[in-house]
Image (tube, helix red, strand yellow):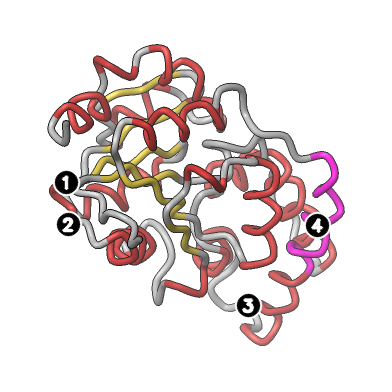
Amino acid sequence: MAAVQPRAAVLFDVDGTLVDSSYIHTLAWWQAFRQAGYDVTMASIHRAVGMGGDRILDRLLPADRDPDQDATIMASHAAVFSTFWPSLRRLDGARELLAQCFDSGLGVALASSARDRDLAMLRSTIDADAYIHAATSSADAKESKPAPDILAAALAALGVPAERAVYVGDSVWDIYAAAALDIPAIGLSCGGTSEAELREAGAAEVYESPRALLENLAGSAIGTLAASVR
């Protein structure tokens, strides 16, 4: 029997939104930069996390750098991040939040810029594949966040138009990507970006964590969307 195509959907960022990994990425980039001879502060790196790796390099490294070194730096970041795979933990309420969205009749997609190998590990950490209809990785988009390509790919995989979706993310880059498609965005501050910054970027709502969003789901944009498909 064919699966019923969802009429509305919730898209989720993963790193920092569902998995407690934002600061691990910060450390991994910091080490990768140092190995390449660049001294970049962790605070600057953390504020860029949520962008694609190519954009992080463009934002944080000199414009006149040797571009042939970029691939090595990104590979170094990936290698350092992989050493932390055993330590990855899903954020409180993440699995239950996905399950509730799924049970409400909404399509659920992970709209992540992670590499395929990292995304596979992140999905294992969340342990909620039964509630996920689709997932994107960096391979599914020409441009990385804050460009909306990843979100557009997730919508295409679900067969849901942008006007029938809500996006949940933890960085201002997530909020900007959603705004490019006129998708309402819910911000989570558990990735280390403040509520004020997320709201200034355009988040319609902000919660501390997946658990906090879950506890307020009925009154959120997700709850409104779920009510429309019943």
Mark on residue 33? none
Label pair 1/4, CB-CB below 8 angstroms: no
The picture quadrant where one finds residue 65 is bottom right
Position of the N terminus, as image quadrant, is: bottom left
- Which comes sooner in the sequence, label 4 or label 2? 4
The residues tagged by marks 3 and 2 sit, at their Cα atoms, a distance apart of 40 Å
Return the residue at label 4.
82
Label pair 1/2, CB-CB below 8 angstroms: yes
Badge 1 marks a residue whose secondary structure is: helix
- Camera-near label (3 vs 1) is 1
- Which comes sooner in the sequence, label 3 or label 1? 3
Q: Position of residue 228 (x, y in %)?
A: 13, 32
Nearer to us in this view, 216 or 78 = 216
Return the residue at label 2.
161
Q: Would you place residue 163 above or below residue 194 in this image?
A: below
The residues tagged by marks 4 and 2 sit, at their Cα atoms, a distance apart of 35 Å
